[in-house]
Amino acid sequence: DAKTTQPNSMESNEEEPVHLPCNHSTISGTDYIHWYRQLPSQGPEYVIHGLTSNVNNRMASLAIAEDRKSSTLILHRATLRDAAVYYCILRDGNTGKLIFGQGTTLQVKP
Amino acid sequence: ETGVTQTPRHLVMGMTNKKSLKCEQHLGHNAMYWYKQSAKKPLELMFVYNFKEQTENNSVPSRFSPECPNSSHLFLHLHTLQPEDSALYLCASSQTEGQNYEQYFGPGTRLTVT
């Protein structure tokens, strides 16, 4: 299974944009880039996913490098409720397995 | 509320006890999953069921026994557990296995084995 590398932790100020990086240099052509987040005392929740093009939804934006070896999750205006562990996952397009790493713990300061 | 419920939310059991964890999804999904989340470790996939058939057993010890009587319910039967089995057990569901259908997770059962 292809691996992702994320910083262990990041800090942000409330109402400022946050850019969460992810490296996945061994990505294969059939791997989709998925992001999930886990708020304290909850199960993970889906945030966004993409293959090659940048993606936007109501929660976030996903910017994917042209060579697909890295991506960035963008929260446009961080709120205190966005404090969570963010997981960048390469999901095999055939098997659909989610292989979680350690993720990035995001702290949002008021 | 994700549409996936788990009971109980907390469980303390001795090493000789037998207990069961229950998961129910109200989303009309056909795939259900058990994950284990230990302290300081990433989530580990344990079992996958697709249309009630087990399609994945990720080398899980036999003291964990899953059951999927229908597409809406998933159980994890526990017996003679070890203290290192203490963890958060998460259930998830998705429309079907494979593809890129997002998984919806329940809140988890916090299990402590004494």
Image (spheres, coloured by chain):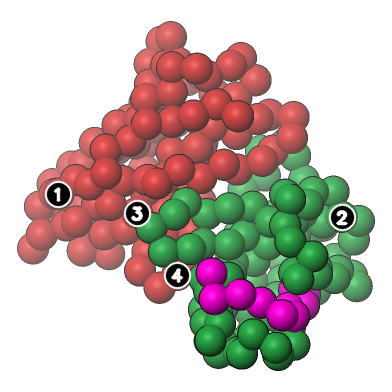
Chain colours: A red, B green
What residue sits right under mark 1 in the picture? A11
Q: Chain of mark 2?
A: B
Kindly identify the residue that appears in the image at 19 percent across and 45 percent down: A10
Which residue in the protein does label 3 denote?
A85
Say whether residue B103 is left or right of residue A59. Answer: right
Report if residue A74 is visible in the image.
yes
Quick check: A10 above or below A6?
Answer: below
Amino acid, disc 1: Glu
Residue bearing mark 4: A42
Residue B18, percent from left and from top:
75, 87
Name which of mark 3 and mark 4 comes first in the sequence: 4
User: Label 2 to label 1, Cα distance in Å?
Assistant: 41 Å
- Side of A80 where A24 appears, left or right: right
Among the two numbered marks 3 and 1 on one chain, the one whose residue lies closer to the N terminus = 1
- Rendered location of residue A61, percent (x, y): 36, 36
| Residue stretch in magenta | B74-84
Q: Which residue is mark 2?
A: B54
